[in-house]
Image (cartoon, grey):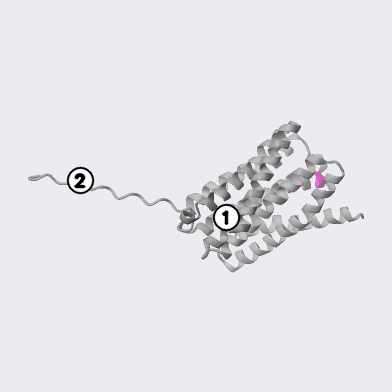
Amino acid sequence: MTAYQMLVAVHVLVGVVALVTFWTAGLLRKGTPAHRTTGRVYLLAMVGIVLTGAPMAAVRWIDGHTVTAAFLAYLVVITSTGVWVSWRAVRDKSAPGRFVGPVYVALGALSLAAGAGVLALGIRSGAPLLMGFSAVGLFTGVDMLRRRLRRATFAKTPRWWMTQHYTAMIGNGIATHIAFLGIGLPRLLPWANGTALHYLAWFGPLAVAIVAKAILDRRWKPRPAAEPRASVPRTQGA
């Protein structure tokens, strides 16, 4: 087994751990010790994915597989961002100013640049999937940088940390499932590979994530307070 094959094997192993613990943490009651412990294991597994995915992207680039390398590098960027945000949102819930500090800004700018790069690559290579998937990095980057600019208002938002945490975890789930469905599953089940699975791998997790985000926002995201209704002055003699 070559060094690259060993790297891929470790990447796949931690990917399986991430996939299992993602759903385990998601199904457990939020805030319980079991949920927190499983969530930590998931984030550690995601760190392992980043640490093994970066050199894999470099090797693919050296081998001349530029599209594959760009896709892997892009996943590394958005995964790193999601892992950091989901972790720091909980750790910094009493210090929102620290949360949107230099690291947050750097990751937001990197996500925006990576999304723009994948969009350009998709246009250049005529790959609609790359063009569509670039929206994740573009949206994430713009949203993070805008939040930094509006940090004074953001700091006063109730339960801001919870919204940031589950949004980032949903983003992590997108990366986890795309990697599994698009890269891992075709190798495990070659007979299942095909155009349908290819599109499902890219856009299936994204569609599910949008629905999950809407449901969680409906339950947890603070709503603006309703303005008090102006009282109608009573006319004399009424």
Q: Is residue 237 left or right of residue 153?
A: left
- Which of the pair 176/108 is nearer the observer? 108
Q: Residues within 10 Å of mark 1 (few under 14, many from 20)?
A: many
In the image, farthest residue toward the right = 1
Q: Is residue 157 magenta?
A: no
Task: Please tell me whether mark 1 sits on a helix, a strand or a loop.
Answer: helix
- Quarter of the image holding residue 129? top right
Q: CA distance from mark 2 to mark 1?
A: 43 Å
- Quarter of the image holding residue 91? bottom right
Task: Give me the residue at 50% from left, 55% from top.
Answer: 151
Residue 66 vs 40, above or below: the answer is above
On the image, the x and y values in percent for residue 49 come to 75, 56
On the image, the x and y values in percent for residue 11 come to 79, 55
For badge 1, the amino acid type reads: Tyr
Q: Quadrant of the N terminus?
A: bottom right
Residue linked to disc 1: 166
In the image, farthest residue toward the bottom = 33
Task: Give me the residue at 75% from left, 44% from top.
Answer: 71
Q: Residues within 10 Å of mark 2 (few under 14, many from 20)?
A: few
Which contiguous range is marked in magenta?
A: 185-189
In the image, farthest residue toward the left = 237
Q: Main secondary structure of the magenta part?
A: helix
Residue 232 image label: 2
Which of the two labelled residues, at mark 2 and mark 1, occupies the earlier sequence position? 1
- Which of the pair 220/77 is nearer the observer? 77
Residue 100 vs 59, above or below: the answer is below
On the image, the x and y values in percent for residue 7 come to 84, 56
